Image (cartoon, rainbow, N blue to C red):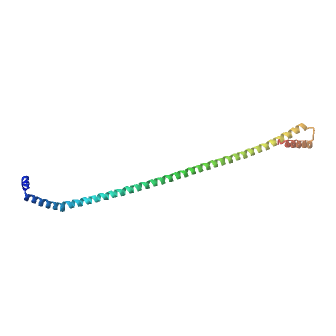
Amino acid sequence: MSELIHNLGIDWKVLIAQIVNFAILLFLLKKFAYKPILKILNERRQKIEEAIERSKSVDLRMQEIETLKQQVLDQARKESESILKAAEEAAQEVQENILKETHERSERLLKEAEKKIGAEREKLVQEVKAGVATVVTLAVEKTVGDVFDEGAQARMTEEALRVVRAEKII
């Protein structure tokens, strides 16, 4: 075997020196490089995990906010619908009141017009009565004027007026 090792060009002294150098290098790397690198990597992993947790927390908070926003929008929509309904009802009530007032006013004007027409009619009836009485008196006087005396003429006039009144002409 020593021949094989010699044929391969391996020197025991150099090999042991290299093993010692490797062990020293491994110790130094482990002490000064590997541990700080692992420490940095662990810190970094921890920061990444914290960031992931914060991200999950933010996502949950965003979902809560979205749910709250939807609830607020739904409530606002309901309130606006109730306000619109109340406004429509108020408008309907105002319209009904206006129509009622207009109807009452038109009825009142109609009654006033009927009263005025009745008063005018009564006035005309009175004027017609006065005119008919005058015409009847003149007619009786003309027809019986010379035949009867004044007392008889007055009686005849009264009788003619009574007949006309009984006939409801006057």
Direction from residue 50 to residue 122 in the image, left or right: right
Total labels drawn:
0
Direction from residue 80 to residue 12 in the image, left or right: left
Direction from residue 25 to residue 98 in the image, left or right: right
The location of residue 70, given as percent across then percent down, is 44, 53
* Residue lying furthest front: 1
Q: Quadrant of the N terminus?
A: bottom left
Q: Is residue 126 above or below residue 66?
A: above
The location of residue 8, given as percent across then percent down, is 8, 52
Residue beneath the point at 47% across and 53% down? 74
Residue beneath the point at 58% across and 49% down? 92
Residue 42's image quarter? Answer: bottom left
Q: Quadrant of the C terminus?
A: top right
Q: Is residue 147 above or below residue 71?
A: above
Residue beneath the point at 18% across and 61% down? 30
Q: Nearer the viewer, residue 135 or 84?
A: 84
Residue beneath the point at 10% across and 60% down? 16
Q: Is residue 78 above or below residue 162?
A: below
Direction from residue 100 to residue 66 in the image, left or right: left
Q: Nearer the viewer, residue 88 or 77?
A: 77
The location of residue 148, given as percent across then percent down, is 93, 40
The location of residue 60, given as percent across then percent down, is 38, 56
Residue 25's image quarter? Answer: bottom left
Q: Nearer the viewer, residue 143 or 170?
A: 170
Q: Nearer the viewer, residue 115 or 40?
A: 40
Residue 38's image quarter? Answer: bottom left
